Amino acid sequence: MTEIYYEDQTGWSNEDYLYLHRYLHRWFFYYKKYEDIILSIDLNRVSKETKVLIYCIIKYYHYEFMFTKYKNLQSLENTEPLTEKLILDDRTKQADDIYKVMNVVY
């Protein structure tokens, strides 16, 4: 079974990306519990949107230490904003935070 973050995201809805975000959020927020999973993520196999979501989660919680603690996440330090807005929840008023900087509405 392919992990959700490795799936082809062509045609995904806002709800699909919101689910992905929640899925990733749990792992990164509780990073000590999910360290093995985090270490197994191959960023070469994930989409730009997934990279941006992981980056946003890390930056939002000020977990920048993850960029050095987890060598597989080092390249995320150079993550650039999405060119097209990714809307996770269109009922939300966008805050002035890392999500806005990265062109994600959450």
Image: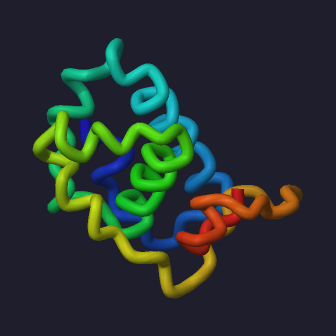
Image quarter in which the N terminus is found: top left
Residue extending farthest to the bottom is: 83
* Viewer-nearest residue: 31 or 96: 96
In the picture, measured across the screen, residue 91 lies left or right of residue 83, that is right
* Viewer-nearest residue: 74 or 34: 74
Residue 33: image quadrant is: top left
Total count of labels: 0
Query: Looking at the picture, how far across and down is residue 34, in whole percent?
Result: 32, 20
Image point 51% across, 36% down: which residue? 25
Residue extending farthest to the left is: 71
In the picture, measured across the screen, residue 102 lies left or right of residue 75, that is right
Residue extending farthest to the top is: 33
Query: Looking at the picture, how far across and down is residue 103, in whole percent?
Result: 60, 74
Indicate whether 10 appears above or below 37. below
Image point 43% across, 62% down: which residue? 52
In the picture, measured across the screen, residue 43 lies left or right of residue 98, that is left
* Viewer-nearest residue: 90 or 72: 72
Residue 14: image quadrant is: bottom right
Indicate whether 76 appears above or below 35. below
Query: Looking at the picture, how far across and down is residue 86, in whole percent?
Result: 60, 71
Image point 28% across, 61% down: which residue? 77
* Viewer-nearest residue: 66 or 84: 66
Image point 53% across, 38% down: which residue? 61
Indicate whether 35 appears above or below 53. above
Q: Give the colouring mode of the picture.
A: rainbow
Image quarter in which the C terminus is found: bottom right
